[in-house]
Image (tube, rainbow, N blue to C red):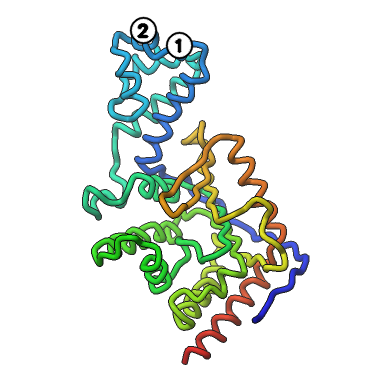
């Protein structure tokens, strides 16, 4: 069994200035509704009945606003923000509200049946589409955004409880659409720390894994992608039981939630946005990033392993 030794190498890749990003509808709606709810809950005037009285609506209407079922008028929105003590945020929330009302369809809305994708997957796709930066830590498998079709299919077949062909096809199509964000002119910057175990996990067999590692080595040459391998000898970050994705959103568009972290579980995909949770994941990321090999060493290892696996498979 091969192993990797850690070397202390400092590397910083130059980055081009990224064009302003377009925020997806699902993220704009999430930021608007969650923002209103957060402002109310942290306000001295948090009583929904009192706020409803001020705008001449029923108490249930405030809940509908915060769940995205209806949108408040500009006047009602101004009254609500004044009541919450944040009247100065009126311009921002008016613009965000209008983004939601405009409802520019997200890329998947016309591509899939109504029941797909699930809400949690749609929100993740929206975050990926809207992000300026992605930071991915994955100790066990190649992360979804960097997977080849054969590798992705092998993992999905192993993980999907419903093995119907139509479900597998939907998930693979959705993944291809999500991966397309990395090819846009305004593609997000992606930094990935990949565990050594992911490089030798026999997903799909030697040929599939060899193709996947070769694709990673090629992706690492892109201007907006940086991949680092974390050797087993470097140790997994203390407290990190699995992988996670940190997504940085454009603060000029999403002011109250400029950062979220996504974690995939066997049941669902969940996200965190509280400052306390984000601080934990940020510390885990910094630890993994410092312990990983340099991009040059990582690319060399990926290319060598890809050649070795492809040769063995043939």
CA gap, disc 2 to disc 1? 9 Å
Please indicate whether residue 96 sits to the left or right of residue 88 in the image: left
| Residue 122 placement (x, y as % from top left) | 36, 48
Quadrant (top left, top right, bottom left, bottom right) of the N terminus: bottom right
Instruction: Give the label on residue 18, or none.
Output: none
> Mark 2: few, some, or many residues within 10 Å (few <14, many ≥20)?
few
Residue identified by numbered label 2: 54
Between 81 and 251, the residue placed more toward the observer is 81
Q: Are marks 2 and 1 in contact (CB under 8 Å)?
A: yes
Vertical placement of residue 88 versus 192, above or below: above
Please indicate whether residue 222 sits to the left or right of residue 280 in the image: left
As helix, strand or loop, the secondary structure at mark 2 comes to helix
- At 34% from the left and 7% from the top, the residue drawn is 53
Instruction: Give the label on residue 83, or none.
Output: 1
Vertical placement of residue 179 versus 275, above or below: below
Vertical placement of residue 270 versus 202, above or below: above
As helix, strand or loop, the secondary structure at mark 1 comes to helix
Return the residue found at the far bottom: 314
> Mark 1: few, some, or many residues within 10 Å (few <14, many ≥20)?
some
Between 27 and 165, the residue placed more toward the observer is 165
- At 41% from the left and 49% from the top, the residue drawn is 268
């Amino acid at each position: 069994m091969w192993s990797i030794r850690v070397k202390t190498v400092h590397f910083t890749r130059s980055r081009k200035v990224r064009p302003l990003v377009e925020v997806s509808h699902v993220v704009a709606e999430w930021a608007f509704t969650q923002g209103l709810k957060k402002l109310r809950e942290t306000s001295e005037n948090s009583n929904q009945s009192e706020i409803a009285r001020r705008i001449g609506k029923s108490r249930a209407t405030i809940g509908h606003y915060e769940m995205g079922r209806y949108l408040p008028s500009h006047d009602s929105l101004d009254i609500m923000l004044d009541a919450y003590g944040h009247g100065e945020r009126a311009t921002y929330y008016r613009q965000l509200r209008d983004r939601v009302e405009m409802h520019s369809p997200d890329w998947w809305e016309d591509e899939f049946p109504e029941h797909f994708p699930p809400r949690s997957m749609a929100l993740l796709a929206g975050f990926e589409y809207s992000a300026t930066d992605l930071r991915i830590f994955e100790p066990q498998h190649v992360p979804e955004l960097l997977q080849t079709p054969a590798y992705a299919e092998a993992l999905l077949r192993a993980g999907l409880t419903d093995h119907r062909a139509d479900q597998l096809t939907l998930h693979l199509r959705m993944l291809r659409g999500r991966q397309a964000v990395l090819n846009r002119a305004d593609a997000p910057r992606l930094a990935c720390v990949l565990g050594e175990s992911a490089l030798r996990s026999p997903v799909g067999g030697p040929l599939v894994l060899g193709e996947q590692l070769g694709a990673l080595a090629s992706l690492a040459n892109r201007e907006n992608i940086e991949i680092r391998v974390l050797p087993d000898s470097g140790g997994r970050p203390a407290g990190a039981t699995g992988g996670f994705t940190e997504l940085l959103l454009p603060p000029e568009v999403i002011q109250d939630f400029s950062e979220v972290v996504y974690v995939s579980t066997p049941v669902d995909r969940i996200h965190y946005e509280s400052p306390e949770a984000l601080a934990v994941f940020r510390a885990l990321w910094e630890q993994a990033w410092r312990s990983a090999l340099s991009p040059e060493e990582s690319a060399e290892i990926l290319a060598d392993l890809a050649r070795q696996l492809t040769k063995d498979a043939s």
